[in-house]
């Protein structure tokens, strides 16, 4: 089946057969969406406990310093530890202070925080379980936060999962992201608009980063429904951030999203 005439091309990119091209995706979920006028980022941060500290914001995910930071990982359940029944270790995929793609291994230690080895993490792309115990998933929520300020939570793996469901991505240095398509859903019959945005202006060529100014790239309205895959075809330059936020008409909805694009070397 050909999707807008691109399936064969995207398949070859996914297989690694086209030099300088790579698939980038973002997945997100949020429960109990409120009616915050400025929107609520599509992540499960409002499910986090107050240990070691309540997140400073669960509606808007903070951004680390562009100079990079040291970060830590802590679990809400003691069974998420080396030798435990839950998540025993994770891989953190991140961008360093230069914007280059990196990854690091962290062995979880339950409710005791573990510092990442690198101290120059600029943006957390994804966290994924590397080894697990008998349950195969996290026994409790697992978060990554700024070592010196536990209120600044950047990403998480939710209880019962083994990978972060946070759709935010920063475009790596030396690359441009071309967003191809996206979809969203809501399951509680609470009308909500899901908006895909990025801190860049792509109405000019080449697109230009606009720090702190997130312009909408696409919007989907859902109400106990799932949108078909919607073509996007918007370009995002290096070091810009793509994010998805929910704007609810009535509180209590549950929504999810998925977007995909191609990273191309500049």
Image (cartoon, rainbow, N blue to C red):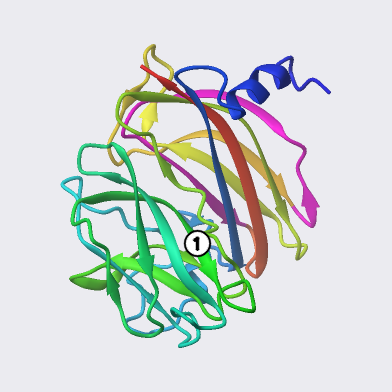
Q: Is residue 124 left or right of residue 78?
A: left
Q: Looking at the image, which residue is at 25% across and 44% down?
A: 96
- Give the image location of residue 37, x and y in percent: 48, 57
- Give the image location of residue 49, x and y in percent: 44, 82
Q: Looking at the image, which residue is at 53% across and 40% down?
A: 196
Q: Is residue 257 left or right of residue 56?
A: right
Residue 85 occupies which quadrant of the picture? Answer: bottom right
Report whether residue 120 is seen: yes
The residue at the far top in this view is 205
The residue at the far front in this view is 83
Residue 238 occupies which quadrant of the picture? Answer: top left
Q: Nearer the viewer, residue 38 or 45?
A: 45
Picture quarter with the C terminus: top left
Q: Is residue 35 left or right of residue 201?
A: right
- Give the image location of residue 42, x and y in percent: 54, 56
- Residue range highlighted in magenta: 223-248
Report whether residue 59 is seen: no
Which residue has dot 1 on it? 130
Residue 220 occupies which quadrant of the picture? Answer: top right
- Give the image location of residue 159, x and y in percent: 57, 75
């Amino acid at each position: 089946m050909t999707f807008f005439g691109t399936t064969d091309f995207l398949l070859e990119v996914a297989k690694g057969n086209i030099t300088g091209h790579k698939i980038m995706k973002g997945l997100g979920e949020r429960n109990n969406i409120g009616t915050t006028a400025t929107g609520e980022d599509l992540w499960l941060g409002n499910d986090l406990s107050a240990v070691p500290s309540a997140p400073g914001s669960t509606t808007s995910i903070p951004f680390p310093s562009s100079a990079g930071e040291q970060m830590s990982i802590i679990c809400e359940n003691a069974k998420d530890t080396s030798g435990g029944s839950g998540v025993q270790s994770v891989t953190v995929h991140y961008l360093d202070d230069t914007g280059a793609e990196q990854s690091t291994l962290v062995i979880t230690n339950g409710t005791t925080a573990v510092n990442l080895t690198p101290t120059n993490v600029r943006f957390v792309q994804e966290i994924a379980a590397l080894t697990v115990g008998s349950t195969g998933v996290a026994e409790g929520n697992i978060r990554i936060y700024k070592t010196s300020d536990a209120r600044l939570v950047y990403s998480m793996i939710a209880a019962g999962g083994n990978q972060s469901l946070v759709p935010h991505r920063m475009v790596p240095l030396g690359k441009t992201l071309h967003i191809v398509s996206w979809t969203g859903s809501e399951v509680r019959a609470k009308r909500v608009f899901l908006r895909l945005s990025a801190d860049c202006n792509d109405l000019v060529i080449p697109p230009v980063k606009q720090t702190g100014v997130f312009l909408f790239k696409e919007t989907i309205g859902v109400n106990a429904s799932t949108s078909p895959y919607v073509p996007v075809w918007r370009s995002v330059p290096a070091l810009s951030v793509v994010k998805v936020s929910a704007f609810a008409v009535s509180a209590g909805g549950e929504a999810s999203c998925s977007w995909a694009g191609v990273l191309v070397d500049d």
